[in-house]
Image: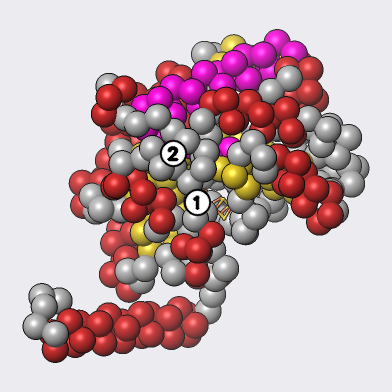
Amino acid sequence: MPEENPKNETDNGPGYEEELLRKIAEHPCYDKKAQHKYGRIHLAVAPKCNIQCNFCVREFDCVNESRPGVTSKVLTPQEALEKTRQILADYPFIKVVGIAGPGDPLANDETFETFELIKKEFPELTLCMSTNGLLLPEKLQDILRVGVSTLTVTVNAIDPEIQAKIVDHIVYHGKVYRGVEAAEIQVKNQLEGIKAAVDAGVVVKVNTVLTPGINDKHVVEIARKLNELGVYIMNIMPLINQGAFADIEPPTAEERKAAQEACEPYVMQMRHCRQCRADAYGLLSQDMSQMSEKRRELIKIHTKEDIERAKEILEKNGEEA
Ligand code: CLF
Ligand code: SF4
């Protein structure tokens, strides 16, 4: 398939096909200009996780993509489809459907069932997923089959010695691995999986949780590797200390900024992440899952009025609305 799937580039993707460029331009996480115009809906259909990160308290949403200390209500694929229907009818500025937990999407078959249902009914939407990458090589064909075009992989270290300090254990093909052995498997799968996804034309973002004293001196090495792999954008997120890392001081805003600046020459940096919930929806800056009914109504009315106005103008100009 390589001739159908252009080589990835790290400079806003001039190698991408038109359809993919449109999806990037309408993706609030991948294009900072899109964040004020377009929204995303997260479907919390994936409760299980196959690893244990040291900063994760498993009753809550996956911290590699979400805000720690938050629990999302898990939906079935059918419930997720219905929720998408309702929300899109009221808020058509939502262009991206993401699955980001509350656990690891690849460790839950419901992720693929949900994407299949969504793709069938809303083929124009961008399907987005966030994973810890352990199962990426073996699940990539499923990811492509259901039509995911933007994929986030959390890479907190590419050196297994460092990764071993971040993840307590992994469960891989029914067996528990710990320490450097676990880290070697995960890092290998993440990097192989990212390479294969990029080669298959998926636009890959990498999240890195900046953890002082653990991976803060290592992030540039990660960024260099991401450049080699053709990753589109990197999102350096601050550690929020909990679980086994409760005593680690999170990075300051300046430390995070310095890390982003040091990585920027190698891979574009995302600086507008909101560490949203696994059930967030709306604009990144306005999570409507947390709004009062009244505020949601106001946005709904506003959106509908805008659409009516746009229709009127088009009709006046003699065009099809
Ligand atoms: Fe969701 Fe993530 Fe897709 Fe965006 S979020 S799966 S890429 S649609 Fe975005 Fe939220 Fe930050 Fe994630 S602001 S936590 S980066
Ligand atoms: Fe928690 Fe996410 Fe790590 Fe799984 S991958 S342990 S859900 S932070």
Tag 1 residue: 30
Please tell me in which quadrant of the rendered image residue 208 appears: top right
Start and end of the magenta stretch?
180-207
Residue that appears at 59% across and 12% down: 175
> If you read the primary sequence from the N terminus, does the residue marked by circle 2 or circle 1 appear first?
1
Q: Judge: label 1 CB < 8 Å from ligand 1.
A: yes
Image x and y of residue 3, in percent:
27, 24
Image x and y of residue 180, in percent:
75, 13
Relative vertical location of residue 321 with respect to residue 171 in this rendering, above or below: below
Nearest the eye: 288 or 35: 35
Q: Amino acid at mark 1?
A: Tyr
Q: Which mark is residue 203?
A: 2
Nearest the eye: 58 or 238: 238
Nearest the eye: 289 or 235: 235
**10 Å crowding of disc 1: few (<14), some (14-19), many (20+):** many
Residue that appears at 54% across and 26% down: 229
